[in-house]
Image (cartoon, helix red, strand yellow):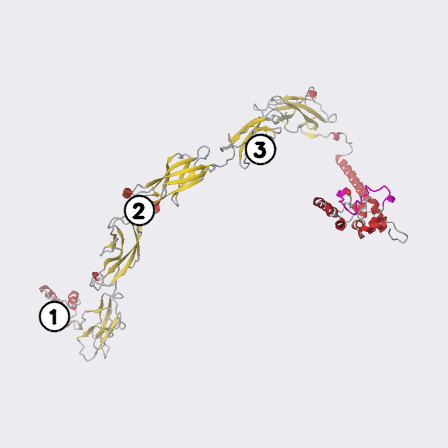
Amino acid sequence: MWTSGRMSNAKNFLGLGVSLYFWGLMDLTTTVLSGSAKPLTKSQEDNLSDKLLLHQRMKRSWVWNQFFVLEEYTGTDPLYVGKLHSDMDRGDGSIKYILSGEGAGIVFTIDDTTGDIHAIQRLDREERSQYTLRAQALDRRTGRPMEPESEFIIKIQDINDNEPKFLDGPYVASVPEMSPVGTSVIQVTATDADDPTYGNSARVVYSILQGQPYFSVDSRTGLIRTALMNMDREAKEYYEVIIQAKDMGGQLGGLAGTTTVNITLSDVNDNPPRFLQKHYQMNVLESAPVSSTVGRVIAKDLDEGINAEMKYSLVDGDGLDVFDINTDPNYQVGIITVRKPLSFESKKSYTLKVEGANPHLEMRFLNLGPFRDTTTVHISVEDVDEPPVFEPSFYFVEVPEDVEIGTTIQIISAKDPDVTNNSIRYSIDRSSDPGRFFYVDIATGALMTARPLDREDISWHNITVMAVELNNPSQVGSVSVTVKVLDVNDNAPEFARFYEAFVCENAKAGQLIQTVSAVDQDDPQEGQHFYYSLAPEAANNPNFTLRDNQDNTAWILTRRSGFRQHEQSTFYLPILITDNGRPRLSSTSTLTVHVCSCDDDGVVISCNAEAYILPISLSRGALIAILACIFVLLVLVLLILSMRRHRKQPYIINEEENIHENIVRYDDEGGGEEDTEAFDIAAMWNPREAQVVVKSRQDMMPEIESLSRYVPQTCVMDSNVHNYVLAKLYEADMDLWAPPFDSLQTYMFEGNGSVAESLSSLQSVTTDSDQSYDYLTDWGPRFKKLAEMYGVTDGSGALW
């Protein structure tokens, strides 16, 4: 039988003389093992005797045992837990004890000879509170079990080795300001890892270390409450409260933990608004537009958020209908704006009484009010130079289209609204009257017609008349004038389109050949009505007659039959059309009637009279072919003649002939040899034969440069004339077909003070013998050729 080293007192108390193992007496065994056995009653002794009889035939059995060991052992030797012993153990070492289960060999070891159990590692109840193990006794020699295997428990006894901890800390809370004493703020909770069922190790008590006298804490629940009345957020908003939790019921030696609670006083509307100024002075220009800002007022509220919202209003004053006030929701200021146009001349100042109030009130704080305040605003209107103002602000004028030029159709009136009342000058914005149909008198503003009006061309005119102050032209006012041109009967009716009628040769008398209608550009109020009749010269027309349908249309009918195309193929019928206007106007339109050959159903076959005179043996196709051949022959003849006329004729001349022909042909004293080199004389004879070769002239610009040194500084060519000459020179250089006219005829300027004087022959003497060209030798190499041609030479060939 198994026994435990801690069971000896129980065996002696029971006096049974044998080791006990109770499967059915768990409570009693537990009571015995715990060392708190009590004397048995009579009924318990009888019950125990009966159960012993039931088990007396069992020779070996285990003793149920529980071992207890304290946690956190810090000694150097293994901690003795207990002893297992079998009554079959004679102490000779023949029994071998084996320990298995949770922690066996790692946490707990057993002496296999003596059965002593030791803990070889530090035990922590918070990590593991108990271990379940199994014990077995074996014959050391045979290994045969001497006792059945049995389980037992080793429980770890708790010690106070863990302080309370606030797992959710630090805490953040808020409570409304001015809250009554005892208002709940927040509940804090501390957790102790020790065994709450063993002693007071896990019994926590709360206390406040910091935050008094404003707050208190319930020692049992950890609920924080307000402890001071009338706490004002505007005085102090943030509080830091430190709470302590201590185990062992708060007794000396208990472990403690702390946490921080940050408490904010939330705002309530307990402060009324107050204006920073009791009087505001503002200025505004009289030209300020409607809705423009005049100024701002502000009422200070110590509260925040919704409790600081303001509502501004005008409650009194002489400008309630002229000004308005709005609240800026972002900055809680009152913005005074212009409600109606201002006039310095009408009223120079206004006084307003402005009220600022809290729209959100709390009934329990009404005794701290009133939650509104007022201020006075004085607004001065400043004078500005305003543009002229038209009265009325819009003009509508009706004028007949036959009004005479210069007729006054309306008097436009404007005035200076300023006190100075400057004089006004009137004009028309020409962009609104591009046709210049109207004119306005600059002083009186009389609007008159300047051109004939035509309703059929422009029926409406929208012009803008401007008024300018005489002393300040920058001040301009304008007004729109709408002119409606009224209709007069000045257009005669005419055919709606060109009418061309056809009558068959087999037509009968009274047959309808055409329906005509008319249009009139006029627009009479009573509507248009046209009257049709044959013109007087065709009143007795024997061929056709006219019927007025009285619906602005007329029928053209045949008066006879027997029309013949070869006799007369076309008839012209004049028709007189008269309108109903005042005065009545009429016009004559001509209807062209063609005589055509038709079939029996009246379908036109041909209206060509020439078909009747064609030879019977010559068809129409043959005639067209003949005409085409004639046309082709004519074209060929014309082409041959043109080619002969434009055939290129070669023209070969030598250099000497070229020089003389040059002089003779343009009958001018040109630029000398530069002209000879720069131009193709053959091209001047026949410009069409010239080849397209761009060749710039090189004579004029260098010549001007060479002569410029002889020109006195007082006679320098004007820049405009110089630019003109250069432009003409460029045109002559680039135009291949223009002859090189370097004469007065083209340039129209010969300069002043030139040492060469004029080269024109217009003022030359009639004969060459009366003129000397000796001075050409002094003009330099550019005039050498000319000097050789006209200079006097001696017998040796030298120039005189």
- Residue flagged by tag 3: what amino acid is it? Ile
Answer with left or right where residue 12 lies relative to residue 269. left
Q: Which residue is mark 3?
A: 428
Taking the view exactly as shown, the residue that stands out farthest to the right is 795
Q: Position of residue 753 (x, y in %)?
A: 76, 45
Q: Are marks 3 and 2 in contact (CB under 8 Å)?
A: no
Circle 2 or circle 1, nearest the eye: 2
- Residue flagged by tag 2: what amino acid is it? Val
Q: Are marks 1 and 3 in contact (CB under 8 Å)?
A: no
Answer with left or right where residue 782 lies relative to residue 387. right
**Disc 1 crowd, CA 10 A, few/some/many (<14, 14-19, 20+):** few
Is residue 458 shown to the viewer in this render? no
Residue 545 falls in image quadrant: top right
Report helix, strand or loop for mark 2.
Answer: loop
User: CA separation, marks 1 and 3?
Assistant: 137 Å
Q: Earlier in the sequence, mark 3 or mark 2?
A: 2
Placement of the N terminus among the 4 image quadrants: bottom left
Report helix, strand or loop for mark 1.
Answer: helix
Give the label on residue 268, or none.
2
Give the label on residue 13, or none.
1
**Disc 2 crowd, CA 10 A, few/some/many (<14, 14-19, 20+):** many
Q: Position of residue 173 (x, y in %)?
A: 30, 53
Q: Position of residue 236 (x, y in %)?
A: 30, 51
Answer with left or right where residue 210 lies relative to residue 50. right
Magenta extent: 745-771
Residue 471 falls in image quadrant: top right
